[in-house]
Every structure is written in C-alpha cells, then in structure tokens.
Amino acid sequence: MHRHGPTLPYDTAWALIALHTAPDEAVVVRIWARENPDGPPGIHYDNWQELSPAEQERRHVWLQRHGRSPIQLLQLEASLILSAGLHVLDWSLPPERTTQWASALEPRSDDTPQP
C-alpha cells in the first residue's frame, strides 16, 4: 500500500471499527489501548502543510465525495475515543476550505446534535 502522508496504525483502525460495530466491546478496546499505548488519548490532527501534493489532492477528492474524513464517517463520539484511551490521528482541514469543512470534520461529542 502506497502512503502519501501520516497513516492510522492498523491496530488503531481495528479498535475504531470495533467501537463502531460493537460499542459493547469498549471494555476490550480499553484493555488493549492500556496495554498498547500509542500516544496521548483523544483525536489529534496531522498538519495539512506537511502533506505531499498528491495526498492533499487525494483528501480534497475524498472530502468532496464523502464530506467527512474516514474517521468522522464512523460517527464515534470524541468522548468514547478518549475514554477508550485511543490515540487517533485524523485529517487536518485544508487551509482554503477550513470554513467549508469545519462543521463536517469537527469531532462529535455527546452534546453535538447529530445530522
């Protein structure tokens, strides 16, 4: 698999999919995250300016098609990711589209109305 920018580790992706498909498995994810720390828990963002032009274009196309980053499409509450102890690297916003994409890429929290 060709990588253009920062990637999400496979095991973190597994944990996110587990939380998405089986929220009752949060205890298992917490135990795994405690035994395999990857950084401070929560959602963190990469730096758009450090991405290759190819990755920036790839993300523009994705955002135009899907309206959200792959992490945001899972619709996991930011508080769940934090409480599970996961360190998640999500996409930063394109500088010229920060206003356009801001609401789509904001981490969801328990008090955020769902569309």
Image (tube, rainbow, N blue to C red):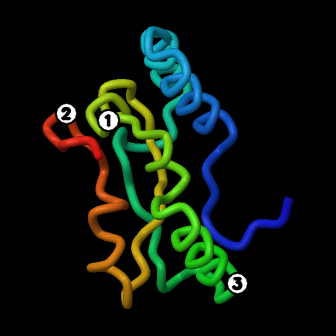
Q: Is residue 35 above or below residue 107?
A: above
Q: Secondary structure at mark 1?
A: loop
Q: Position of residue 4 (x, y in %)?
A: 71, 73
Give the farthest residue toward the front.
115
Find disc 1 in the rendering and name its residue: 77
Point 56% across, 28% down: residue: 15
Mark 3 or mark 2, which is nearer the start of the sequence? 3
Q: Which mark is residue 28?
A: none
Q: Position of residue 82 (x, y in %)?
A: 32, 34
Contact flag, marks 2 and 1 (Cβ < 8 Å): yes
Find disc 3 in the rendering and name its residue: 54
Q: Secondary structure at mark 2?
A: loop
Q: Amino acid at mark 2?
A: Asp
Mark 3 or mark 1, which is nearer the start of the sequence? 3
Residue 85 falls in image quadrant: top left
Q: Residues within 10 Å of mark 2 (few under 14, many from 20)?
A: few
The alpha-carbon separation of the residues under discs 1 and 3 comes to 30 Å
Find disc 2 in the rendering and name its residue: 110
